[in-house]
Image (spheres, helix red, strand yellow):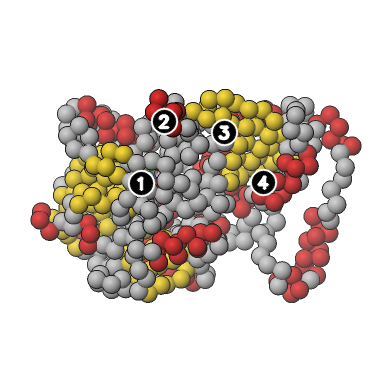
Amino acid sequence: MAFDSLGAFIKAADEIGEARFVDSADLDVDVGCLAELSTERKGPMLVFDNFAEYPRGYRVCSNALQTPRRLALAMGFPFDAHPVELVRLWKERRRTNAPIPPTMVTEGPIFDRLQSGDDVDVNSFPTPKWHSDDGGRYIGTADMVVMRDPEADWINVGVYRGMIQARDRISLWINDGNHGRIIAERYWAQGRAAPAAVVLGCDPLTWMTASMSPPFGVSEYDVAGAYRGSPVELVPLPDTGLPVPATAEIVLEGEIPPPSEESAHEGPFGEWPGYYSHEGNEAVLRIKRIYHRARPILLGAPPNRPLVTGPTAVPSIAVQAWEHLDRTGITDIAGVWAFSHQLMLVVALKQRHAGHAKQALLTLASLRAGGMKCFYVAVDEDIDPSNIDEVVWAMCTRVDPSSDVDVIHKAWTADLDPRLTPAQRESGDLTMGRMMIDACRPFAWRDRFPKPNVFAADERRQVETKWRDLLEGFGQRPGPRKTG
Ligand SMILES: Cc1cc2nc3c(=O)[nH]c(=O)nc-3n(C[C@H](O)[C@H](O)[C@H](O)COP(=O)(O)O)c2cc1C
């Protein structure tokens, strides 16, 4: 079932015990720090209310999709599915669901309240300091920046961090090469400001789609419809005509002038690799109108250290990497996973021939999406690629470091990469090495490789069923994994 608003998703998450409501938290430390702790502990979605100096009902929601159960809830997948099975189901949905274009409506709760002219004040919404050393208040972390391509009339939606600069200004950091940047530059090349709308809260699945990158010319709204299984309902904004979800929480409408005309210093901001690695002069949104619901919820996705996965419990990069392997004809993939957001990609496969694992690694290394990566690992199909303990065990016992590791020099990275040297930054050399690790049993003598000392899957299942009550006290385990 698709959720038609953030509020509906919160209600459903609460019903399955995945949400916690927090009253009177402090915006300077409590909200950001609780979000960080919940991320690290794979804790609940947090909904904060009753901030000092703000009306009750002006809320902040964080950690929306950070457990497999919440991601499954958003996508309508079984709650007890193994994480790798969720990747497979997601990939399947991308394959079978044609894009579903949005439907246009004329009304929606987003028009409950309007600020315009001198009344515009983006500070009217409680905005946390997500980390203590942030250079400002980032109202845009789980935002959606909506723009129309001036040359081809399609709508792009992207997630770009937005920092409050003044009551009617936020800065936006849009990476070179991202579609939003290309579109803004098309307006700037015509000597015009780019009309833009920034959505600050909507159903989390639509938001998540905006952080993925379909080909240029394909709207993320169409992809969101496919993921939802039903169209996103959009309303055109009065000033720019830009379409936004009718049930969005808060929308800023305005324009992004060429940076030569106006820009602002933004950052530093504690970013997703876990460091403060980028700040500088960036484009700004001149806000002309703000629309919001009567009791708005600001959706936040603060970048916390990616100790396990990233902003979503099931990494979308794993879905794209698996598709890429399928497309290039690499067979017998048992699963794909990504750790530390996207910095380490792991493929599990049943080796069919000599060099099969190396072929998979080379293919993974050619994936364009998400430029900044470091490690690619191939493991046999008996290893759960989403279980870091099993992956490390395979790396420590099936790899001869003198022959099973290859290093690629000078590959693409991003300026968020903390390992770039100061000299590289100064010269614009945004490149980094990458490592491919073949942690599969050597193909030629795989049948003679020592046998692991673990019980077979069916024996474990039988014991788990027989001793269910006893095992409940042992901690949570994910459901069975499908291989092949
Ligand atoms: C939580 C989150 C924050 C992000 N912040 C930024 C950002 O500040 N700037 C940026 O260029 N990309 C950021 N991204 C990545 C882009 O949203 C992503 O590359 C997206 O595909 C860009 O869409 P586009 O190609 O349509 O422009 C972020 C992604 C997520 C999930």
Nearer the N terminus, badge 1 or badge 2?
1
Q: Position of residue 447 (x, y in %)?
A: 87, 37
- Read off the residue under disc 2: 425
- Read off the residue under disc 1: 268
Q: CA distance from mark 4 to mark 1?
A: 34 Å
Q: Could you tell whether 156 is left or right of 75 in the image? A: left
What residue type is disc 2 on?
A: Arg
Residue at point 37% right, 71% down? 25
Q: CA distance from mark 3 to mark 4?
A: 17 Å
- Read off the residue under disc 4: 385
**Local SS, label 3:** helix
Contact check, label 1 and label 2, Cβ < 8 Å: no
Q: CA distance from mark 2 to mark 3?
A: 31 Å
Callout 2 crowding tier (Cα within 10 Å): few <14, some 14–19, many ≥20: few
Callout 4 crowding tier (Cα within 10 Å): few <14, some 14–19, many ≥20: many
Decide which of 258, 294 is in the foreground and name it.
Answer: 258
> Outermost residue toward the front?
422
Residue at point 38% right, 57% down? 132
Nearer the N terminus, badge 2 or badge 3?
3
Q: CA distance from mark 3 to mark 1?
A: 34 Å
Instruction: Report the disc number at residue 324.
Output: 3
